Image (spheres, rainbow, N blue to C red):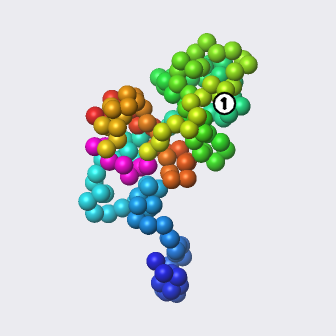
Amino acid sequence: MSPRAAWRLESLGFDNVCDYVGGKLDWLAFGLPIEGELAAAMTAGRLALREVPVCRLEDKLSALAQRLRPSAWNECVVVNEPGIVLGLLRKPMWEGATDAVTAEQAMEAAPITFRPHVRRDEIIPYMEKHKMETALVTTPDGKLLGLVRRDAAV
């Protein structure tokens, strides 16, 4: 939207007017609301489990194992304070870990991520081809949105 249009909307009483300079693909990649054909499509954003265990770089794997052992999770996403994905830990990485090992030392750095607009018929074949059981879903700036399980998305 042009700045002129934004000003006009404000003059008509709209309070929250934004000048969105990204494109349509950027809008979709952030998982923002859409209309039309894509609105009904099954996407990574819709398939993603939102309540994913997270930890910080400095977290000890032994404490993480105690926290996650009672849960059914086999993954823990390493994020910074704003929620940007830095790495991924899988259960074999934290099981039997000592107090000296941190998430940063054991994590899989820079894991593959998908944007929320990626369709199921794109993400599942990719996961199958690369033998991925799970895939992270993030915004374009790397903020964690959730995790897709291949077996639940088929």
Considering only vertical position in the picture, is 118 above or below 1? above
Residue under label 1: 104
* Residue at left offset 50%, top offset 71%: 21
Q: Is residue 44 left or right of residue 80?
A: left
Instruction: From the top left corner, tell me how far across and down residue 78 is, in percent.
Output: 60, 35
Residue 5 inside the magenta-drawn segment: no
Q: Amino acid at mark 1?
A: Glu
Residue 86 makes an appearance in the image:
yes
Q: Quadrant of the C terminus?
A: top left
Residue 152 makes an appearance in the image:
no
Q: Is residue 28 left or right of residue 18?
A: left
Instruction: From the top left corner, tell me how far across and down residue 114 is, in percent.
Output: 44, 45
Residue lying at the far top in this picture: please name it: 96
Instruction: From the top left corner, tell me how far across and down residue 138 is, in percent.
Output: 49, 46
Which residue occupies the foreground of this view, 27 or 108? 108
Which residue occupies the foreground of this view, 23 or 91? 23
Under circle 1, the secondary element is: helix
Q: Main secondary structure of the magenta part?
A: loop
Q: Please tell me in which quadrant of the rendered image residue 84 appears.
A: top right
* Residue at left offset 58%, top offset 15%: 95
The span picked out in magenta is 115-121
Q: Please tell me in which quadrant of the rendered image residue 24 appears.
A: bottom left
Instruction: From the top left corner, tell me how far across and down residue 52 is, in percent.
Output: 51, 35
Residue 119 inside the magenta-drawn segment: yes
